[in-house]
Amino acid sequence: MGEGNPVLLITGDYIEKGTTSYILEETEVLKPYNFTWLDDIDFHKIDPANYQPNQVYKPALAETVWQSGRHNTLLQAIANDEMRAFFISIERTSMVAPYDGGMDFILKDIQTRDSYKLKYKAWLSKRQDGF
């Protein structure tokens, strides 16, 4: 992300349509961030076979700065599968999506991808397919 660079933190909450208070607002690990709540995504309209009427996803974003150690509490909660969130760097044209078994990087081009593969070779899966 680049030390001191601005990043967007993206997360969200599954709620019933019309809910005005969100579980994420009560989540201790997210209290240091100032979230802006975005419009609901109505999953029932997208996939009615798997989602109930009025079941929506409420995305939220917060502007923050990437600093070494600053987001460790949040990253630990994600690693423990207690929450889901990802970071976007507009400046670096990249996205980092940590999860309970690792981390995915979406990078701006093949050259950047290849340089990260070399830099973090020891962290990559030993499987032939890379997963």
Image (cartoon, rainbow, N blue to C red):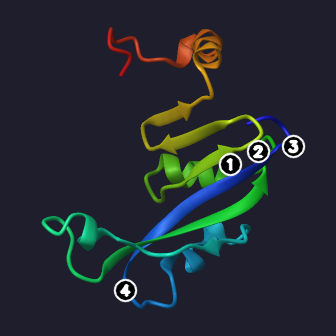
Camera-side residue of 33 and 8: 8
Q: Which mark is residue 57?
A: none
Does dot 3 land on a helix, a strand or a loop?
loop
Quick check: marks 3 and 1 in contact, CB under 8 Å? no
Q: Is residue 39 above or below residue 92?
A: below
Quick check: marks 2 and 3 in contact, CB under 8 Å? no
Quick check: marks 2 and 1 in contact, CB under 8 Å? yes
Neighbourhood count class around disc 4 (C-alpha, 10 Å): few under 14, some 14–19, many 20 upward = some
**Residue at left 73%, top 49%?**
7
**Residue matched to label 1:** 72
Mark 3: amino acid = Gly
**Residue at left 77%, top 57%?**
64
Mark 2: amino acid = Gly
Camera-side residue of 12 and 121: 12
Q: Is residue 24 above or below residue 77?
A: below
Q: Earlier in the sequence, mark 3 or mark 4?
A: 3
Q: CA distance from mark 3 to mark 4?
A: 37 Å
**Residue matched to label 4:** 17
Q: Earlier in the sequence, mark 2 or mark 4?
A: 4
Mark 1: amino acid = Asn
**Residue matched to label 3:** 4
Camera-side residue of 14 and 99: 14
**Residue matched to label 2:** 69
Q: Earlier in the sequence, mark 3 or mark 1?
A: 3
Mark 4: amino acid = Lys
